[in-house]
Image (cartoon, coloured by chain):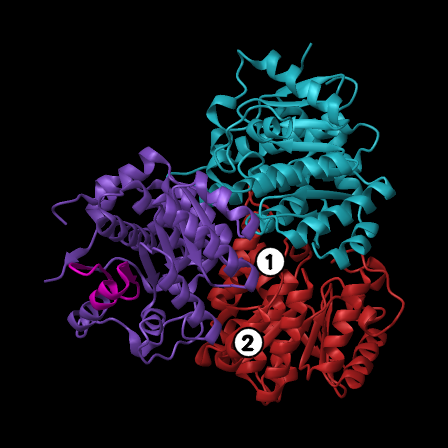
Chain colours: A cyan, B purple, C red
């Protein structure tokens, strides 16, 4: 990435401490809050329709994560999203489990249709479900058949770019290889480790980081999203290197937060495995 | 346990990665998800009545934990449970705080009556409340008067077996000594450590593991439940051995997850303190 | 603190294991439960209006934390609070985000008006919002302009004391310097570390500890509150000393729990930096 330094993207987060409003699932919400604090942002959670507009008004960005959606919080997502749109705040959609139930697929689709979404961040099965493509999710995990590989990378990137054009949002698909694209350009990120799939919340935390990075870098949302994806992957690699003989996913989760906390712009730049696709 | 190896029960979990749907409390839900991932299963949480049937359909088992029940999620429990029953998926009931409030006692009783429950996993005070026996719970902890001891073990096992026969479910009562029984047979498990009572969620995590083990071992649900109880107790012992001079319940929680993550079938078999009662 | 030993306050918690009912946010609820277990108390969470009265009846204290309030749980807070008041159980209000939204400011005010509140524990921006003073909160964090400093300590303490007199509750304002006061007396606590602001939940956990300490020391609620504030700050200092070269806020969170777990009355007394203000 020449035009925009990853270093600057992270430095801007730490310099501005963006306040991110999260309407998210209760499974990983604590990790989401600590991940935002680790990277230098500040979290606030509010999902009550009567509360979300005031909260969004004082924030710099919004995350809508449907991991444990219910009718009340769906209403909160729309109310917060409309306010965010009116204020020009970036909105990140995490369509957890889209494709796994009608309610999830429809809700994610409606949020994407009706709100001014900045970024969609999900796994390939979720993103395919959003795109109306045939997909068989396996709960909240991607179907192995949907994996992005070196062999199908160009094809996958083309698919992501088309969806980005159609939705007018940046689309970030994470997996063994991450693809981040808008209608014009696409990046592949090869940071990360399979261990990320052995903790709950790696994707949720990333969606929060994306909101923080985009809020802190409003003029370069594609690069900011790519930087967030890279930071999360690099944190996973750093955490994995720290694993000792008794450590498992409990320690790994802690180490990921620690790695985000200690990461600075130079370390991000040095560790990044980012490629702009043709 | 001669007829069925504990080793095989755990190996089957890791080989099949059962997808477990959890309707559970928001206190320990993150630990539940990470415990399932640690043991080689996969978690999904969904409690909205309009969502749970689709989600249960793609899953292999269901956990109903009433730790922070509310009217909406109770409706979700029944809807998910009926779908699970229709599909032949195992259902595990964790009657958190039964006996501590009328709503909890009644809800647990109704779930047990109306659904095709495979396993009930609770402490003795909760299980006594379910059985309609006089019981005085102390919040979500067992009343010390209800402790299973070497002295009352035969009597306790007989009580558990009677409840199992009455409910047509396996009943797993955990405490200083764990008792797992169906109408015919009963096992005592002497793994575990009192430190498990100094973290929140040890019981909740175990109920999730039970669902994973039973889903992965459909022909031997009693042995599978016993294996899950043994695995959780052994993880506690492994975690306790790892405790250093500055460690407390924060580290212990992490170490329990790590121990589950690293446990294989041979370690489970070697560390098991399981006795079949006469 | 001459008249009442901090040591005794903590010893009483560990000797009596107070059962604390928490209606709190889903972001930090797991840490709240583990913090109560760490300090020797016992947690239970229940927010359903149909459940909370029975639960409060068997408990020794109540925490009302509005961090992720919704209409259902607000109703639960009033129902639980009225029962607690009727039974003479201490109630602690944590007005998370008061000042940040109308719903939060109004709800916190209503809870304070209508319930027999024992303690209010918040940051200065939240407490100012409760007092109707001009305040601009920054989400769930205090506005830097509201910081208690050595320069404005006397003035800050006077403000806190006036609010305590007006509300007939102990008021504990935490920040760089903590101020704990009733209408008559005020204490400054200089324990703690800025790292507490880099994890989610430090304030929430403290509010739970306050409930445990006040429940276990019913004759000395001001001193008990001061002891809880001191214990939390000291745990943060102990955790900070333990931080190694790879540690960040993930490990710090664990270390805080560990420090609470290992703290005894003598350590609390020895580490306390408490001053009674004139």
| Residue B233 image-quadrant placement | bottom left
Pinpoint residue C46: horizontal percent, then vertical percent: 54, 68
Circle 1 sits in a helix, a strand or a loop, which is it?
Answer: loop
- The answer for how far apart the CA atoms under marks 1 and 2 are is 20 Å
Disc nearest the viewer among 1 and 2: 1
Q: Nearer the viewer, residue C237 or B163?
A: B163
Residue A142 placement, left or right of C226? left
Question: In this rendering, is residue C42 above or below C236?
Answer: below
- Same chain under badges 1 and 2? The reply is yes
* Chain-order first, disc 1 or disc 2: 1
Question: In this rendering, is residue A228 above or below C14?
Answer: above
Q: Which residues are magenta?
A: B161-187
Say few, some or many: other residues with alpha carbon within 10 Å of mark 1 (under 14 / 14 to 19 / 20 or more). Answer: many
Pinpoint residue A145: horizontal percent, then vertical percent: 48, 22
Residue A53 placement, left or right of B51? right
Q: Residue at 47% across / 72% down in the picture?
A: C40
Q: Which mark is residue C212?
A: 2
The answer to whether any part of residue B218 appears in the image is: yes
**Quadrant placement of the N terminus of chain C:** bottom right
Circle 2 sits in a helix, a strand or a loop, which is it?
Answer: helix
Residue B12 placement, left or right of C230? left
Q: Residue at 40% across / 48% down in the picture?
A: B84
Pinpoint residue B85: horizontal percent, then vertical percent: 37, 49
Q: Residue at 55% across / 81% down in the picture?
A: C215
Q: Is residue B181 magenta?
A: yes
Q: Which residue is mark 1?
A: C26
Q: Nearer the viewer, residue C166 or C109?
A: C109
Pinpoint residue C213: horizontal percent, then vertical percent: 56, 78
Q: Nearer the viewer, residue C10 or B156?
A: B156
Q: Residue at 61% across / 12% down in the picture?
A: A154
Could you tell me which chain the residue with mark 1 belongs to? C
């Amino acid at each position: 990435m020449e035009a925009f330094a990853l270093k600057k993207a992270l430095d801007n987060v730490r310099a501005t401490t963006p306040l991110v409003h999260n309407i998210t699932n209760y499974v990983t919400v604590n990790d989401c809050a600590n991940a935002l604090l680790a990277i230098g942002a500040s979290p606030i959670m509010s999902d009550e329709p009567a509360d979300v507009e005031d909260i969004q008004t004082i924030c710099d960005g919004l995350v809508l994560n449907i991991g444990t959606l219910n009718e009340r919080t769906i209403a909160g997502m729309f109310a917060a999203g409309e306010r965010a749109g009116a204020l020009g705040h970036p909105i990140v959609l995490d369509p957890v489990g889209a494709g796994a139930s009608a309610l999830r697929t429809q809700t994610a689709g409606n949020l994407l249709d009706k709100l001014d979404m900045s970024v969609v961040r999900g796994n390939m099965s979720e993103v395919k479900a959003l795109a109306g493509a045939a997909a068989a999710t396996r709960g909240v995990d991607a179907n192995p058949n949907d994996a992005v590989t070196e062999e199908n990378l160009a094809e996958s990137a083309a698919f992501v770019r088309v969806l980005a054009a159609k939705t007018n949002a940046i689309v970030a698909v994470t997996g063994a290889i991450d693809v981040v694209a808008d209608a014009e350009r696409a990046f592949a990120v090869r940071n990360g480790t399979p261990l990320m799939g052995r903790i709950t919340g790696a994707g949720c935390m990333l969606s929060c980081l994306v909101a923080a990075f985009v809020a802190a870098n409003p003029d370069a949302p594609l690069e900011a999203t790519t930087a967030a994806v890279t930071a999360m992957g690099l944190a996973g690699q750093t955490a994995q290197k720290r694993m000792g003989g008794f450590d498992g996913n409990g320690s790994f989760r802690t180490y990921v937060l620690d790695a985000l906390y200690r990461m600075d712009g130079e370390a991000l730049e040095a560790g990044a495995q980012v490629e702009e696709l043709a």
